Image (tube, rainbow, N blue to C red):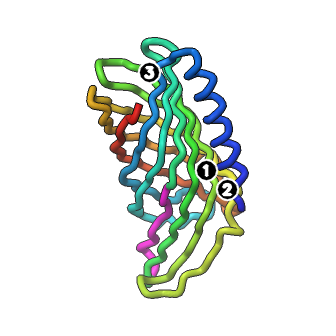
Amino acid sequence: MKCTKAFVSTLLFLTFVTTKLDAQDLDIKAGIRGGLNISNLQGGGASGDNTFRPGFHLGAYGEIPLSDDLGVIVEMLFSQEGTITRGARPHHYVRINYLKIPAMVSYSFAPGFKGIAGFAFSAPVYARHREGRDGRERNFIDDIHNQVISFPLGVIYEMESGLNVGARFDLGLSAIGGDGARSNLLMLSIGYALK
């Protein structure tokens, strides 16, 4: 229930904007995107022994041109994040899955290359903590804020075929919960423009 309102609101907004802009014959792109996540929790009450945890992201995106070089990219992604605490015995494993909605400005600075920066709003849909590989999992989604804000900054390379690859760093701006820890995330993506 935490992410239902955000999901529906964003879907309605994107449908409205796409319909209005499509009526103006703009070259709107829509596609799919997914790839590797490497995430960590740092600051606040997070352990200094935390290390990066692998995961993945998958979803859809739309890109609206504002000029020849500027555009707006909005994505809706399922994103696996978390951390592994290796200093403890047994190791501690934290996994948090989000519905992530980045809204970014893109700037074409060379043929095929775009720089991207903006804000991402994330709503948790799953949160588990486990001690050791075979330990019992504990659900702690009620301890996490309904919305987490981050700052994505990166680059995308687009090919004429519609295939694109990208890398971005997603810096946590707000704490994920009451202990003040923030999520930092490296995302390596591959995508394909459908239109």
Using the rendered image of the protein, determine whether residue 29 is visible from the camera's viewpoint: yes
Magenta stretch: dominant secondary structure: strand
The total number of labels drawn is 3
Q: Which residues are magenta?
A: 79-88
**What is the quadrant of the C terminus in the image?**
top left
Q: Residue at x 52, y 44 (%)?
A: 171
Q: Are marks 2 and 1 in contact (CB under 8 Å)?
A: no
Residue 87 placement (x, y as % from top left): 43, 74
Q: Are marks 3 and 1 in contact (CB under 8 Å)?
A: no
Name the residue nearer the viewer: 101 or 24: 24
Residue 3, labelled with which disc?
2
Q: Residue at x 57, y 57 (%)?
A: 98
Name the residue nearer the viewer: 27 or 171: 27
Q: Residue at x 48, y 87 (%)?
A: 135
- Which residue is labeled 1 in the image? 122
- Estimate the spatial distance between the alpha carbons at disc 3 and disc 1, rounded to whole Å: 24 Å
Callout 3: SS: strand
For residue 1, what is the image quadrant?
Answer: bottom right
The reply to whether the magenta stretch includes residue 108 is no
- Estimate the spatial distance between the alpha carbons at disc 3 and disc 2, rounded to whole Å: 30 Å
Q: Is residue 150 left or right of residue 80?
A: right
